[in-house]
Amino acid sequence: MESNTPSVTALISAFGRAYHATHAQEKIFDDYLADQLFTDEQRAFFSENLARSFAFFDPEGAACVASQEEALANFMRNQSLPITLSRARYVEEILEREIQNGVTQYVILGAGLDTFAFRRSDLMQHLALFEVDQPATQNYKRARVQELKWQVPPQLHWVALDFKHDALMRALEAAGYDSNALTLFSWLGVTYYLARDVIDATLRDIAVPTRPGSTIIFDYLDTDAFIPERTAPRVAKMQTATQQSGEPMQTGFDPARLGAELDARGFTLQENSSPDDIQARYFRGRTDGYYAFEHIHFARAAVKYR
Ligand SMILES: C[S@@+](CC[C@H](N)C(=O)[O-])C[C@H]1O[C@@H](n2cnc3c(N)ncnc32)[C@H](O)[C@@H]1O
């Protein structure tokens, strides 16, 4: 990714949430603000290009569609939305519960164009929020928020950094993060793009000063996703596409070893949801063809008591 351009995957994730909010009858996650993040020109640009990309993801399916709208709907249903919507819903469900248990800080790592701060005033009133992202993506979002004249809540703290080079917890503390407060960290749609040593260093960095009992939630690709003969076709296509967009997927975890790996980095694994679990929780009974993405898992872990 170029350092002066916003993350393409963040834009596509937000465009997907906007598409779902404006098109779906039965919503998995209702990001009713996301559509406003896009100008008319941007909406037309993403609609056209993502519809066109359906031919790459499913050449046979693309030969049968009659319009750009149909191609876009197919791309969204098959390729883009199942991951984005289910992970967003999962984290906000857990956050609601954790606020009841005393969480007063929420740190969104790799926030992209997440609209939580502006959409969930019901939860914001209980929280200090820290949005962490690379400067180019965060600056882009802040400029758009300003253009839209959205009221930035005083509890929102922007933290611009790169996990690869910068000390996360030092930057959070400089922005007002309170290490005595119970905190929920979310890290959605990010671990796949980071090298393993960067993930490990970030987890260790979080675990040291953070109050025990605090929670981290992240989604991850399993290691089978990186073994060509085992990778599900749509995941293989996604890997090719993200590589071409300059944000290659590079790291996966073995679900069976995740508990031990987190334990060594200061966390106790509390929930490790497989694609089948995610299917049962968010997609069972749907008649619109959405189903959980192969190889994508959700992990929830707590900072260990020492
Ligand atoms: C796929 S987007 C996900 C955005 C958001 N969490 C969501 O679910 O829509 C990945 C995000 O991680 C951020 N990111 C990727 N690598 C990063 C790094 N090394 N340091 C900081 N942020 C990074 C990108 O800028 C982008 O906003």
Image (tube, rainbow, N blue to C red):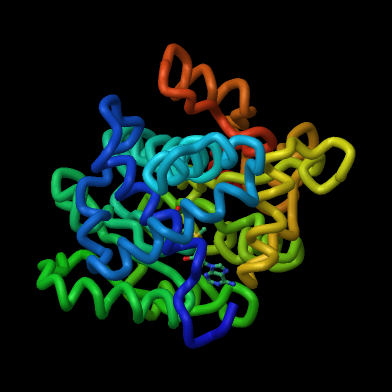
Given residues 225 and 70, the one toward you in this image is 70
Given residues 269 and 239, the one toward you in this image is 239
Callout count: 0
Image quarter where the N terminus lies is: bottom right
When the figure is inspected, residue 30 is found, relative to residue 193, above or below; the finding is above
Query: Quick check: 128 left or right of 169?
Result: left
When the figure is inspected, residue 127 is found, relative to residue 173, above or below; the finding is above
Corner quadrant of residue 257: top right
- Can I make out residue 189 in this image? yes
Given residues 140 and 58, the one toward you in this image is 58
Query: Quick check: 36 left or right of 137?
Result: left
**Which residue is at 45% across, 62% downward?**
10
Residue 182 pos. (x, y %): 38, 50
**Which residue is at 74% across, 36% downward?**
232
Corner quadrant of residue 139: bottom left
**Which residue is at 21% across, 53% downward?**
33
Corner quadrant of residue 200: bottom right
Residue 154 pos. (x, y %): 15, 69
Residue 218 pos. (x, y %): 55, 47
When the figure is inspected, residue 64 is found, relative to residue 160, above or below; the finding is above
Given residues 246 and 153, the one toward you in this image is 246
Query: Quick check: 191 left or right of 143?
Result: right
Tell which residue pokes out farthest to the bottom in this image: 4
Residue 76 pos. (x, y %): 46, 42
When the figure is inspected, residue 33 is found, relative to residue 277, above or below; the finding is below
**Which residue is at 49% across, 37% downward?**
65
- Can I make out residue 178 in this image? no
